[in-house]
Amino acid sequence: MRRGLLALLLLLLVLPLGADTLDEVGVRGVLRWAGDASGGGPYIFDGPDGALTGFEVELARELAGRLGVKDAFVQGQWDKLPQLMDRGGADIVLNGYEWSAEREASWPSSVPYYVYTLQLMARKSDGLSSWEDLRRPREGRRQRVGVLSGSAAERCVRERLGESVEILGYDGVTNVLRLVEQGQLDATVQDLPIAVHYGPQFPALVRVGDPVAPGWYVIFTRKGDERLKARINEALRGMFLDGTLRRIYAKYGIWSPEQESLVAIGAHWPPAAASAPRAPTEPLRWFALLAKAAWTTLELAVLSMPLAMLVGLLVALGRLYGPRWLGIPLEVYVEFLRGTPLLLQLFVIYYLLPGIGIRIPAFWAGVLGLAINYSAYEAENYRAGLLAVPKGQWEAALSLGMAPRVALWRVVVPQALRIVIPPVTNDFIALFKDTSVCSVIAVVDLTGAYNRLYNDHPREVLQLGLMAAFLYLAMSYPMSLLARRLERRLGHGRIA
Amino acid sequence: MIEARGILKSHGALKVLDGISLSVAKGETAVLLGPSGGGKSTLLRCLNGLETFDAGQIDVAGHRLLPGRRDEAELTALRRRLGMVFQQFYLFPHMTALQNVASGPRYALGRPREEAEAEAQVLLARVGLGTRAQARPDQLSGGQQQRVAIARALAMKPEAILFDEPTSALDPRMAAEVTAVMADLARAGQTMVVVTHAMGFARAVARTVHVLHAGRIAESGPPEQVFTAPREDVTKAFLHEASGG
């Protein structure tokens, strides 16, 4: 490690100009490639022996070999892999990334290594026969199509079917296939390699129609790494011409005749930028999208918090004043929900409950998950608040002849509610931000929408970031003001 | 009205109440005096069931209290007929003065708000706070708060009111406001049991003074006798100390 660093320093002295990651890779003897193993097969996944496997794993190994170095896999979150590379965490991005003019502008791409197509999949029992069948409403609502967030599949469905279907974006692949199988989604559009790889594991699903909308998987490099890119292109061409690529793809069942076109396409790479100049109204469209998502955030928070407060109060009352047998189950409730991540709880509610016949629409699953999760925190707030009411208040109420239950509701609880205003306000603001976790169940809140836009328009990070920050502030600041006013108004109830 | 016999209460080895007996007649103002830790407040709190005791029995306002487990419903019924005023007032901070006074009739007896608050307004006037009905407790002085607390107890039309050091947390001027109200009540024939250190009040208002020491009643008698011709050494020592000697 230290020797590597020293060599790097020397290198920087020797090559002050024209520095290229290729030199660094050579000195290090390792090509670091970024991917996301949670994306699944056949790209990068855990093989039966526990070792990383997949056609991209083999591709990376072969590529590094042709550059005369070893390869090292760097795990990252899929939609943030280029940023990981930009920060210096990896040398290249190699993980089913589709080429687009937008991406090309930020990260120069290698020649394509795979021609993918998009495959529509649905339940066998539904008898869907074409894309057009999706336009028909089902049970009085639009059909639901699940896709990978920010993928070419998402854009393709939007372009072909537009508003006639409900498009839901997810972070994973197998979870979407399961949702189709369970009936929460009606169909999904996946890159063909995924359909090939996971088809056998989901026998209830069938491929509908021919694959459509071909596109190219490419390797992204950092800007300025021209020599590294050239070496990669040369290696990829070599792998194509000597049959290495075909051998790898065939091994994973994803070789197709279209792959033959790769060399010809690669000869004139990248394609001339066909992207039209950005319409001046484009930022307005972004803002509208973000504002709509902000509204979702608001709805999630405003619907779930009162529920969390109510359940929390009841749990706290049960623990402090309820029958003794109730104490342990309630304590378990609180500790379990505080001790497990919200993400997992949402996952259980949305993906696992349908297994026992309980199907909750994504938005309401989000509200429920947030409410249940936060009820545990509110229960502790209220417990502390109830205990903070002076004993004398109880005695005064009882001495007036109020029954204990009446004293609790009329005297103790109202004071406890005032005591806990600050911590509950805090939690409300925290919940606002936690709504972003709902993206795992395809509920697009402000953070989710920002991530997607950013993914499509990586160069507009500043503009998009400012818009999102503004919207968050526009929601949370009035909330703080309201809480402060509430506190001041009820603050008269200072405890003597 | 109140008849306590042989009340025994211990905290471990310490006998807080050591077989105390106390009798208070209807319309009587009884004052409990004595050094701190003598058991005055504990005895008072046993009378309305805020504390339990180990032996003896108490007959109060038509209910009988015995050692051991209590029936909450019966305690609640007893407390509706027996008011209590605390040293720290314990007004409900989330209610106005008027709502505090009306809280007993409204929430303990379930009477309509308008009716309860109309009566509460009269009681506030009676303790000299007719104009402060809408004030919150933290907007009132200590003396005013204690007078609201007295009005709150009166609102239940109790057969007797227990006062637990009602002026100890107040400066002399505010204490005087409170004792003036209590003296009025005594003249009106309200049965009262008062734990206090205020000798002036005891002298002027009490019909009977009981001196408690070490969990027992050392001496009982009319104030003129107890203050001017104490029979017991304990009383003499206490009076000597209390007069600043």
Image (spheres, grey):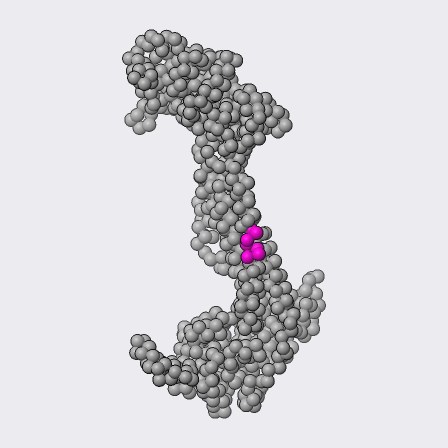
Q: Residue at x 38, y 14 (%)?
A: B210
Percent from the top left, x then y, of residue A239? Answer: 47, 88
Is the residue A282 above or below the residue A349 in the image?
Answer: below
Percent from the top left, x then y, of residue A446? Answer: 57, 61
Q: Looking at the image, which residue sits at the far bottom?
A: A242
| Camera sees residue A232 | no
Residue range (magenta): A473-479
Residue toward you, A398 or B94: B94
Q: Residue at x 51, y 44 (%)?
A: A421
Across the whole image, how many numbered discs are drawn on residues? 0
Residue toward you, A444 or A294: A294
Q: Residue at x 51, y 78 (%)?
A: A107
Q: Left or right? Give the position of A15 relative to B154.
A: left
**Predominant SS of the magenta segment:** helix
Tell me which corner region of the image, top left, top right, bottom left or bottom right, holds residue B226. Answer: top left
Percent from the top left, x then y, of residue A347? Answer: 52, 60
Is the residue A336 above or below the residue A260 in the image?
Answer: above
